Image (cartoon, helix red, strand yellow):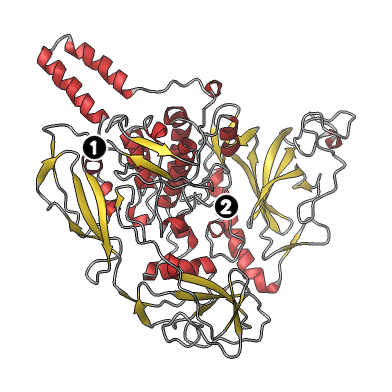
Amino acid sequence: MLQDINKLCMNCMSELGEEEICSACGFDNATENQTGHLPLKTDIKDRYVIGTVLDSNGEGVTYIAWDKENDCSVRVREFYPEKIAARDEDGVKLTVSTDNDLLFTQYLGEFIGLAKKLEDCADLNNMFRVIDVFEDNGTAYYVTENAKTITLREFLLRNGGLLTWDQFKPLATPVISTLSSLHAKGIIHGGISPETLHVGRDGIIRITGFSIQSIRMENSELSSQLYPGYAAIEQYGFDGKVGTWTDVYSITATIFRVLVGNPPPEATERVSSDHMIIPAKIVETMPQSLLNAMAKGLAIMADDRIKSMDKLKTCLLSQSGGVIGSPTIAIQGIGKKNVDPDSTDLIEDDLGEESNKKYVFIALALTLIILFIIFYFIWRLIISPNLFGDKDSSSKINTSSEITSSQTVSDEITDGATVVVPQCVGQTLNEILSDVNTALTLKFTVIEKNYSNEYERNTIYYQSIEAGETVAEGTTIEIKISLGPEMIKVPVVRSMTLEDAKLTLIFAGFQLDNIIVMQKDDTTIEDGKVVGTDIDSGMTVSADSTIIIYQCNNPNGSNQVGGNNGGGNGGGSSSNTSSGGSSTSSDGSSNSSSSESETPSTSTGESTTSSDDGGVG
């Protein structure tokens, strides 16, 4: 048993000996304490000696610590919402103002409740086991076991940037099962990403980063923590219906990142432009069922998404569809990435070879005709159309980390195979492609998008081949998609965050390219929140109208804003007149309040393929 705590490195909990600088991690034990966090060597509950900070967010702080009772290192999570609480003069206890007392008590109760639920999950291997929950110093703590791990993000960087599905599948499957067990206990994580999944030396991926739900919502009284690319659209506001499907989105986005090398675009961006393309060399290693599962797991709207981890697991592990081998996809802006062969002992699974071996044994007992039919069937599966394919050839150079590509999909189909055309009109393209059979046997091309008072936005209102007709497998069906009503009502966005205001306008029917942001002074609105729009709420305007969002940039300003929506003249034009004030565009240039705003040009390209799964715009 360790006799002298002073002989411990406060960063890695290794024994120091007589030195102040740790030979294991290089930490200097004479380092001064960081402001706002518990001082080094603070003794909590007369049992846990606090070390350095491992991570923190708007809910609290996680420290490495030493458990004197069990003589081992642990992780201590402290509830410390900096937005509504502060440290006492001793740097340890928390104090809360009268104004925030009720809010603090509410969130403290949620924190303790979550900790106790996690404590009941001792049988789950893919997370750090909770060993203690207690209250002290005016707040609450829970303690978990500790192990040397690195984040999944760092693990990927050390192993060539990405893995194949056959390499990642045995690592990811237990995580999905653990999330299913957590959901059964009423625990929604809300922050699954390569940053909150940790890989241990034992090869187990552990889930970390558990927080109360408010931290995982953008509109929160606390400082929220979302992971762009991995957070689902419902976490950015609107109805706020977070559930098991939210974690489905996050874990699917994580799988996408592991296999492709980049995360999906942020959910708020996908609302207006939904394009996620996978390089051909990567597609060729993937079963069609995996592509299908990712498409359904990453559906933007929760109603279109896979709802449970068990369903996601079933879809991911399904063997239907074979391995995609026919598409040729040229990628620009993405360097070739190789996986370190020493990083795993797993061997890539070849579905075609396994099936052929099985059928060779069957052929010993069957006639030559049956053997021919079996091989013919396998051949047909291997050349099935790619779910994410695109008949068009286009080239987009990507200067950021997002994925763009030009691609050509083979039009080769199997002679004689037929399929019945489904009912497309009245459904979204997402709903059509959620049927595995349909996604594998038919192609869909969006030839037009028009306004419609009869059909909701993103709903198919025309299909070139009527439902019920029998066509050859691989047939392309042309469809037309509704942009929603041509005339739309301006929603109320006053006092919202800028991102929420944009999304609210987009869901109302405005095009993202037609939404302009300008800055304005207002004494009645919190700095950074939306003052209003140049068109009054409740007014009906054309869906292709330009609309200006005014964001408060000085809470102490003198200008007041009129109109029901905080707008100006409410006349439905793209200009605004405020009472003697001035507006500043988002690029920092100053504009007179009576000047006209320039209407941006918009893209009108209409020809898309089944890779467009019905996103807005």
Q: Is residue 137 left or right of residue 170?
A: right
Q: Position of residue 596 (x, y in %)?
A: 50, 81
Q: Position of residue 562 (x, y in %)?
A: 52, 88
Residue at 63% x, 57% y: name it. 58
Residue at 86% x, 28% y: name it. 17
Q: How many marks?
A: 2
| Camera sees residue 422 | yes
Q: Which mark is residue 250?
A: none
Q: What residue sits right under mark 2 in the picture?
A: 211
Q: Position of residue 361 (x, y in %)?
A: 22, 11
Residue 161 or 399: which is nearer the viewer? Answer: 399
Q: Tell me which amino acid carries mark 1.
A: Asp
How packed mark 2 is, by other alpha carbons closer than 10 Å (few <14, some 14-19, many 20 or more), is: many
Q: Tell me which amino acid carries mark 2.
A: Ser
Q: Secondary structure at mark 1?
A: loop
Q: Do the residues under discs 2 and 1 have CB atoms within 8 angstroms? A: no
Q: Which residue is the extreme one toward the bottom? A: 579
Residue 288 or 597: which is nearer the viewer? Answer: 597
Q: What residue sits right under mark 1 in the picture?
A: 411
**Quadrant showing the N terminus:** top right
Residue at 53% x, 65% y: name it. 219
Residue 203, compared with residue 610, is above or below; it is: above
Q: Is residue 194 left or right of residue 431?
A: right
How packed mark 1 is, by other alpha carbons closer than 10 Å (few <14, some 14-19, many 20 or more), is: some
Question: Of label 2 and label 1, which has the lower sequence position?
Answer: 2
- The nearer-to-camera label among 2 and 1 is 1
Residue at 65% x, 36% y: name it. 146
